Amino acid sequence: MTVPPSPAPRGRVAVLGAGPAGMAAALGAIKAGHDVVVYERYREARPAGNILNLWPPPLKALRSLGVDTVDLGAPTDSEFRNLRGEVRARVKLDEDVKREFGGGFIGLLRPELYERMLAALPAGVIRFGQQVARIEQDDRAVTLHFADGSTAEHDVLVGADGIDSLVRRTLWGDAPKREHRLHIFGGFTFADVPGTEANKCIVGHSRTTQGSWTSIRNHGRDGHQWWVLTATDPDAPAPADLKAAATALAAEFPAPLPGLVAATDPGSVQRWVLRDRPALKQWSKGRATLVGDAAHPTSPYAAYGAGMSIEDGYFLGRALTGVDLANPVAVSRALQSYEDPRKPHTAKQVQAAYVLGKVFHHAPAPLRPVRDFVLDRTPFLQKVVGDSNPREINKQLAFMEE
């Protein structure tokens, strides 16, 4: 008679940060059979921004992690257009993918995603108001030293603490951020604005500015989000009136963008400066690893920052399934198996987003007419964005076997 192998003992996993990356990592580790604590420095899980889009792979990851994705966001078809409204590229997702994931690419607001992920976590997993000051590790455990003088030991530490990650800095030292020299203004409205099209994501460009909008669905209510993006001095102070600055940038674009900005409550307009970090050759060391912006901060040009963070949590949970976390060799092997397939994908998305920002916003003035002629009259953008994105999405979905 064959005796089935004993299940691996429950390990102790700490996650630093309660954003989408941290919540997904926690859900993945819980699904893998381990005990999890998420340490969040704020008193609540606070969405970083308001507007959001998700591709099919993170939607599949959310489903697998037990998050309710029913009626989450508005399905959209994405197009790149010039200032005259002419289509430069269409993102052609496979029809079976669109059917399976409710239209594929969806527009939503970050707070609802947070609410749904929080609802999927068991009570007490997140400990708020926890400021980690220092991290140590050895073969036996990872020790977190908190600002109040207390400590906690865990078998594995997951750094989900953003672009200024303490975990990344502890593992790999500090490094300067890469400035994109761009900033973005974004907002949303549920007003009925003339010129909008249902289930569309329109990414428009003038010679210097991106002006875009997409359908959203939030708590069963249909609306639109919008954003305008242009070059800036990253050290310059933010405009005093964010809506006025966005209004000026949107003015040159065709309807409905100016109307969407006009219909937006000033309190629903946000601004952020675009930065990332060069890709790391290695994410994990010993008993610690990185997820989300701690590992691969990216620009909104990828429309994939939160999505990749969610995928990280899914793949990390899969790597930790059946692993004895008391065994340092087993932990190291599992963390390496998590990061190896993630690094090429995330590095490609981060760099592509950076390059698109350079092409659209930092081309020298004499070259801009040439650039626009190429984008308007050749299939270049279709190949770079419209055709390559669906291939990468299908590749990620294939990795995600249930």
Image (cartoon, grey):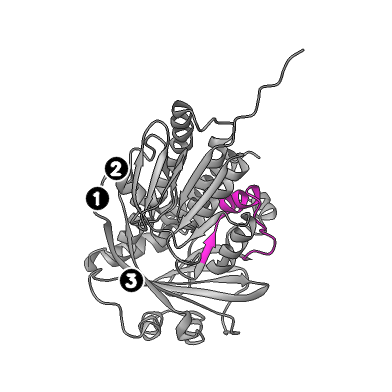
Query: Residue 374: image x %, image y %?
Result: 36, 59
Picture residue at 38% right of the left edge, 51% below the top: 294
Label 2 to label 3: alpha-carbon separation:
32 Å
Q: Secondary structure at mark 3?
A: strand
Nearer the observer, 302 or 202: 302
Q: Which residue is mark 1?
A: 175
Give amino acid for label 3: Thr
Would residue 125 be found to the left or right of residue 97 on screen?
left
113 over 384 or under it: above or below: below
Q: Is residue 371 magenta?
A: no
Which one is in front in this view, the residue at disc 2 or the one at disc 3?
2
**Residue that extends furthest to the front in the rendered view of this protein:** 149
On residue 230, the disc is: 3
Which one is in front in this view, the residue at disc 2 or the one at disc 1?
2
Picture residue at 70% right of the left edge, 21% below the top: 4
Give amino acid for label 2: Trp
Residue 45 appears in the picture as rendered: yes
